[in-house]
Image (cartoon, rainbow, N blue to C red):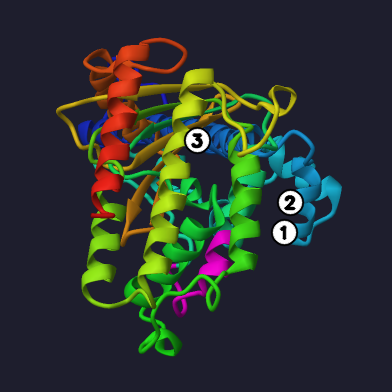
């Protein structure tokens, strides 16, 4: 509507209504445009997050597995439906997101990039009853199979106590540790009134599993940081079992001590060579390299960082031989920052530092030898 000067129909109230209506329509148009822009931005951000999710899954899958095939099976979808979700053409549902997160141990707050101090850990074996130690070793073997499915892999270990698999280098020590963990830690009822004897409790199946774990572990290059107390817990266990009458005879006790000395000798030889291998192996079968450091002032905390084709797992032990792991990059960076600082204050004794290497392993031998007195 247009008003001219002198128009008899000129009415200020009508002018005000007209102007008000025009301003309202203008405001509504602006609001709708802003809303459309906000929706478009939200949709684009959602699509981007969805594409990042699938890219993250692809990067963390072993190279021989197909992401599309995995998702077809997991979500019961056709390949075409999966491809449309990967490209962001179709949004995934909350149910599909939950299934994916549960399957691949993903943190939802990490996916949507929430910056909090919370860290999501996975705890294998947390649900259900305490498994037999043989089942625990089977789970460990599967984990190492998974690690070795990646082309590039390396491990960093801050050692408060020797890794479990080292105790499976020799059968007598393997049997003693399995008996100890099963009776004293897992509180197995069938072992309540039993004493240790290698003849009665050889745990052949566990030893064979432990050897297979070692074969897998030996294929992973690693950096290990030890200290003088890294075998002290096992020494304390031997003293406790001896004094509490948990060895069937002095002969059985001495048998385990001999196996313990063999274990130390083998670790010494590996460190001298700078590679990992099973007892009795020749140089042809030597596997991945090991960098062995000794720190005289820090006990460590049994943390591991495992890098797999550019991605990482950080592992923390709890309740003696159980572990938690996370893919959180911030947590990995904190652990590696501390690890790197400690390395700078430690002594490398693998393939070099003969004097320091001999001093370290001889001190361990002396501790074990003193147990026989």
Q: Which residue is mark 3?
A: 266
Quarter of the image with the N terminus is: top left
> Circle 2 is placed at which residue position?
71
Answer whether residue 298 is magenta in the image.
no
Residue drawn at x 32%, y 38% as measured from the top left: 365
Horizontal relation, residue 90 to residue 223: left or right: right
Q: Quadrant of residue 296?
A: top left
Query: Looking at this view, is 156 or 79 the one in front?
Result: 156
Taking the image as drawn, is residue 31 in sight? Answer: yes
Decide which of tag 3 and tag 2 comes sooner along the chain: 2
Q: Are marks 1 and 2 in contact (CB under 8 Å)?
A: yes
Segment tinted magenta in the rendering: 126-137
101 on left or right of 129: right
Q: CA distance from mark 3 to mark 2?
A: 45 Å
Residue 204 pos. (x, y %): 63, 66
Q: Is residue 116 visible?
A: no
Q: Is residue 136 magenta?
A: yes
- Counting residues from the start of the chain, the first of labels 3 and 1 encountered is 1
Task: Characterize the local packing of mark 3: few (<14), some (14-19) or many (20 or more) Cα atoms within 10 angstroms.
Answer: many
Question: Please, is residue 186 above or below residue 88 in the view?
Answer: below
Q: CA distance from mark 3 to mark 1?
A: 45 Å
Q: Eyeballing the image, is 349 above or below 286?
A: above
Q: Is residue 244 above or below residue 230?
A: below
Q: Residues within 10 Å of mark 2 (few under 14, many from 20)?
A: some
When asked about the image quadrant of residue 305, the answer is top left
Q: Which residue is mark 1?
A: 74
């Amino acid at each position: 509507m247009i008003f001219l000067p002198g128009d008899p129909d000129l009415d200020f109230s009508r002018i005000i209504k007209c102007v008000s209506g025009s301003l309202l329509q203008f405001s509504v148009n602006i609001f709708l445009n802003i809303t459309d822009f906000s929706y478009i931005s939200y949709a684009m951000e959602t699509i981007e997050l969805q594409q990042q999710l699938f890219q993250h899954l692809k990067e963390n899958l072993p190279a021989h597995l197909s992401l599309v095939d995995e998702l077809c099976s997991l979500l019961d979808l056709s390949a075409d439906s999966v491809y449309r979700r990967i490209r962001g053409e179709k949004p995934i549902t909350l149910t599909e997101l939950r299934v994916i997160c549960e399957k691949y141990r993903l943190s939802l707050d990490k996916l949507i990039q929430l910056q909090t101090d919370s860290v999501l850990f996975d705890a294998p074996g947390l649900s259900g009853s305490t498994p037999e130690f043989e089942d625990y070793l089977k789970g460990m073997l599967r984990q190492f199979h998974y690690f070795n499915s990646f082309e590039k892999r390396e491990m960093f270990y801050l050692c408060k106590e020797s890794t479990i698999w080292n105790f499976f280098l020799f059968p007598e020590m393997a049997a003693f540790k399995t008996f100890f963990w099963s009776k004293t830690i897992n509180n197995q009822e069938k072992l309540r009134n039993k004493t240790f004897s290698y003849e009665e409790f050889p745990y052949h199946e566990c030893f064979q599993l432990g050897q297979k774990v070692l074969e897998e572990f030996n294929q992973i290059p690693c950096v290990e940081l030890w200290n003088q107390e890294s075998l002290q817990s096992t020494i304390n266990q031997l003293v406790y079992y001896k004094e509490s009458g948990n060895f069937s005879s002095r002969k059985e006790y001495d048998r385990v001590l001999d196996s313990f000395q063999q274990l130390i000798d083998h670790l010494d030889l590996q460190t001298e060579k700078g590679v990992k291998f099973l007892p009795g192996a020749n140089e042809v079968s030597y596997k991945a390299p090991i960098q062995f450091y000794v720190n005289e002032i820090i006990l460590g905390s049994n943390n591991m960082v495992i890098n797999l084709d550019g991605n990482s797992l950080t592992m923390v032990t709890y309740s003696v031989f159980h572990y938690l792991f996370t893919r959180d990059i911030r947590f990995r960076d904190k652990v590696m920052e501390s690890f790197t600082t400690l390395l700078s204050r430690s002594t490398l004794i693998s393939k070099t530092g003969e004097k320091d290497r001999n001093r370290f392993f001889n001190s361990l031998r002396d501790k074990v030898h003193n147990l026989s007195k």
